[in-house]
Image (cartoon, grey):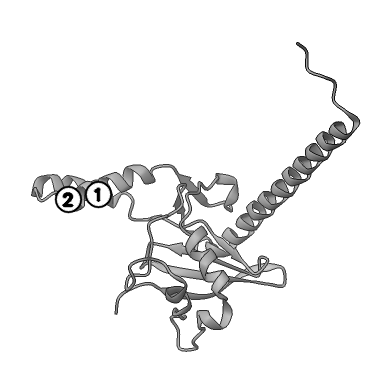
Amino acid sequence: MSNPDLSGHQVVKVISIVLKLLVFSLVCFSCTSREENEIKELMNAVFEWELGRGEEVIVFAEAEENWEIPWLDSCSVEGILSLQSDFRYKVLFKDEFTEADAKKICREGRQAFRFQQDMFPSGVKVSSEKGKYDSLLAIYLKTSISDIQIKLDIELKKYMSYKAISKPVFLQDYRYAILYISKEGPHLSVFKKEGGKWVHYFTSTLMLI
């Protein structure tokens, strides 16, 4: 038995659904494209100092997911809003960011993400060896056999100059950007959009005192 033909009402309904899906897809594509473009612009500011000195920068392609505020069990709104800048002129997170911002930092800042080479300026190389590094480190921390530790230590030293950074979190309609960097002391770097360009605003080191 064949299906009856669609009525005029059903046809209109189907067309309406298709149009909604099309609009949704276009909106999502636009959001993704904006985020990718902002990441590219942000990375110019993130590595401006090193590249200005002619240094080679190597970044792991896999974003850093395993970070938290050391004095708390997990990332939380209270923990984020309790942070402040490292320097004498104090910038308090609670003065710049809302509870919604803090929730977004905890939620998106530790998401799985993979950086692409074209997201970085010339002079920054993207490495896909973070998985290998994490595995070596895990074995090194668990083993107590000295000769194995020595071999692992040699292997791990190859990655001493590599940087592990989190997926950037953009806040307040791309007014601020925050990312976690685990090298040179784990810290949150905060960038601000000024005159259409990302500039470093302040750093908050995440270490027990």
In percent of width and height, residue 136 lies at 26, 45
Q: Vertical placement of 92 versus 10: above or below? A: below
Residue in the picture at 27% in, 52% down: 157
Measured Cα–Cα span from mark 2 to mark 1: 6 Å
Residue in the picture at 17% in, 45% down: 151
Q: Report if residue 52 is visible in the image.
A: no
Q: Vertical placement of 48 versus 133: above or below? A: below
Residue 69, quarter of the rendered image: bottom left
Give the position of the N terminus as an image quadrant: top right
Q: Are marks 2 and 1 in contact (CB under 8 Å)?
A: yes
Farthest-out residue, bottom? 88
In percent of width and height, residue 188 lies at 46, 69
Residue 64, quarter of the rendered image: bottom left
Q: Identity of the amino acid at label 1?
A: Ala
Q: Vertical placement of 140 versus 46: above or below? A: above
The residue carrying mark 1 is: 138
Question: Dot 1, crowdedness within 10 Å: few (<14), some or many (≥20)?
Answer: few
Residue 128, quarter of the rendered image: top left
Question: Dot 2, crowdedness within 10 Å: few (<14), some or many (≥20)?
Answer: few
Give the position of the C terminus as an image quadrant: bottom left
In percent of width and height, residue 135 lies at 28, 44
Element at label 1: helix
The residue carrying mark 2 is: 142
Q: Is residue 55 left or right of residue 147?
A: right
Residue in the picture at 45% in, 57% down: 110
Q: Identity of the amino acid at label 2?
A: Lys
Q: Is residue 114 left or right of residue 171?
A: left
Q: Report if residue 157 is visible in the image.
A: yes
Farthest-out residue, right? 8
Element at label 2: helix
In percent of width and height, residue 143 lies at 14, 49
Farthest-out residue, front? 1
